[in-house]
Amino acid sequence: MLKAAVIVLIVMLAYAGIYSLMSIFVPAVMMKGALTATTGKNLDNARDDGYLKALTGGQRNIGIYALTTTIAGFFVLFAGFRKGQKWAWWSFLVVGGIAWLWGLIYSLVIGDKVNSLLMAIGIIIFLVGLLIPVKEFFGKEAEKSEGAGQ
């Protein structure tokens, strides 16, 4: 089950990476729904007053933070998770949970349907990858192997 979970988490991290890259390279596409949901106006209104440059710059920063988190996720996945180390499972739970859940809650609160859907897809993939190997990380077999290593 651990191998299957690793594959699912690779898919989730690739999905997160694509989402991040879109925020970096096509920020207007990624922020369109949030801007409309929050202000009731479209991006053309922001162009008129010069706000678009500031907004896209902020979106690119968000994308860069998300991309670095995704890269760190790959390190955690291959350095600890695929070896069955509990710290890696907890790392995914905390960091992935905060990232995906915050994005979903924020998108739902402001009424951004597109990003809500994208975040919901990410959470589903994330949870599947995290929950498939729970017994391997926290079952009786995991406790026995930990005790033998001490």
Image (cartoon, grey):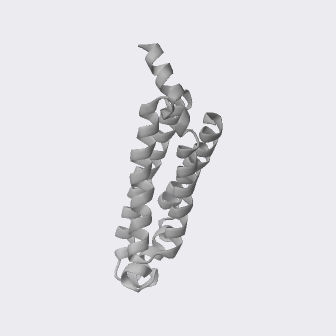
The percent position of residue 144, horizontal first and vertical second, equals 49, 21
Q: Is residue 98 visible?
A: yes
Residue 57 or residue 16, whichever sits in front:
16
Spot occupied by residue 103 in the image (x, y as percentages of width and height): 42, 62
Along the line of sight, the residue nearer the viewer: 94 or 77: 94
Near-viewer residue (112 or 60): 112
Farthest residue toward the front? 140
Camera sees residue 60: no
* In the depicted structure, whether residue 26 falls above or below residue 129: below
Residue under the point 57% across and 45% down: 129
Depth check: give the residue in front, 15 or 58: 15
Please determine whether, in this image, residue 102 is positioned above or below residue 68.
below
Residue located at (50% from left, 62% from top): 119
Q: Which quadrant does the N terminus fall into?
A: top right
Q: Position of residue 9 (x, y in %)?
A: 57, 44
Counting from the top left corner in percent of width and height, residue 38 is at 37, 79
User: Looking at the image, which residue is at 65% across and 39% down?
Assistant: 4
Write the residue at 43% across / 78% down: 111
Could you tell me which quadrant the C terminus lies in? top left
Q: How many marks?
A: 0
Q: Is residue 27 above or below residue 80?
A: below
